[in-house]
Image (spheres, grey):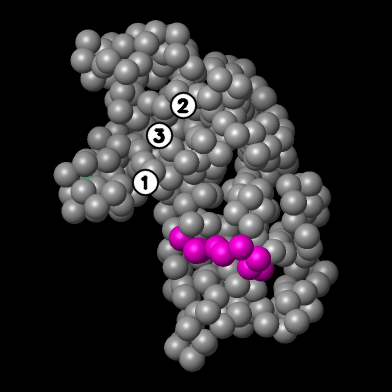
Amino acid sequence: MKAAVLYGPRVLKIEDRQVPSIGEREVLVRVKVTTICPTDLRKYTGHSTFKEPLVLGHEFSGVIEEVGEKVDFLEKGDRVTVLPFIFCDNCRYCRMGRHNLCLKLGGIGGAAELGVKLDGSFAEYVKVPAKNVYKLGRNMTYTEGSLIEPLAASLGGLLNAELKPGETVLIIGAGPMGLLQISLARMMGAGRIIVSDLLDERLKYAEEFGADVVINPVRESVYDVVMRETRNYGVDVAMLSTGGTIMASLASEALKFTAKGGRIVVFAGVWPPTNASLDLNPIHYGERKLVGSFIYNREIFSRALEVAASGRVNLERLVTHRFPLNNIEKAFQVALSKEGLKIALTP
Ligand SMILES: [Zn+2]
Ligand SMILES: [Zn+2]
């Protein structure tokens, strides 16, 4: 089978490999669609560590080709997507259902680096633990199946924000995650949805996905627009979904335009790690909350799948480019250029 193997920063080789042989509780998936995630880009550019040669890719869908002996709930031919994190199921967090906080969080395709590591989906076939496999809804496309992973992470963010019907939401960053958050916030009953991004192209997508107000901070102050739109109260929820070191200053800025009782969600990681300096008084006197959100547990992944099956989020619209696996280098270049949204590979 063909597989794209990463040996080091920007050293990606298409190789001919043996189709993986599966264990009794594993299944073999023939990959149909797999999408590129910023995590893959970080590994590709050398901004994230990984040890041995690795096949990247953790957002994917496909068809089951082979089922392990002890797997009785899946069959050859099933159309599926895969939860790409490996939970130990034994630590305190796993036992409380908070799998995303697992002490030994492992992953498929470099999704996580501590526990079990398996090769990912930038290949024709991928072997995965059966308990991580989820069947697609009857009407779902493989592209939608590939995007359950980012949808689940976005949903986790809004659930951690404890969004209530009618509340005003500010989403900073209109990349694929921000756009999914717009759709989900709409579905969950948000009142006004305000979105900011430095790229006008992305603000156009934001409007298409359901933003009421868009802001380009190059031209307008986010603070001014938020205050104007909220009768000077500020937003109830601020999602910091841009990523990058700017997150540190955004956290302290967001305290100024978040309403009392509001929640600020640190949705993306900050690389390289950067300290934020915060005025604690708005947190104390205004009972504002600064909350983290990192991926999802099994419940949220299942819910994301059901949301997608309902057809109420336009996942197809997120994919702007498609490349065959052989052109993976080109696909990575397009993804790095930030032209378009999600880049899909079709092995
Ligand atoms: Zn991802
Ligand atoms: Zn665990």
In the image, is residue 167 part of the stretch drawn in magenta? yes
As shown in the figure, which amino acid type bears the numbered disc 2? Answer: Thr
Q: Are marks 2 and 3 in contact (CB under 8 Å)?
A: yes
Task: Find disc 3 in the rendering and name its residue.
Answer: 83
Per the rendering, the mark at residue 189 is none
Instruction: Please provide the residue range marked out in magenta.
Output: 160-170
Residue 216, above or below 80: below
Q: Quadrant of the N terminus?
A: top left
Asked whether, in this view, residue 160 is left or right of residue 106, the answer is: right
Under mark 3, the amino acid is Leu
Q: Position of residue 220 (x, y in %)?
A: 80, 72
- Most common SS among magenta residues: loop
Q: Which mark is residue 81?
A: 2
Residue at mark 1: 297
Badge 1: residue crowd in 10 Å (few <14, some 14–19, many ≥20): many
Task: Kindly report the distance in space between the C-alpha atoms of the residues bearing marks 1 and 3.
Answer: 10 Å
Tag 2 near tag 1, CB within 8 Å: no
Camera-nearest residue between 124 and 235: 235
Mark 1 lies on a secondary structure that is loop
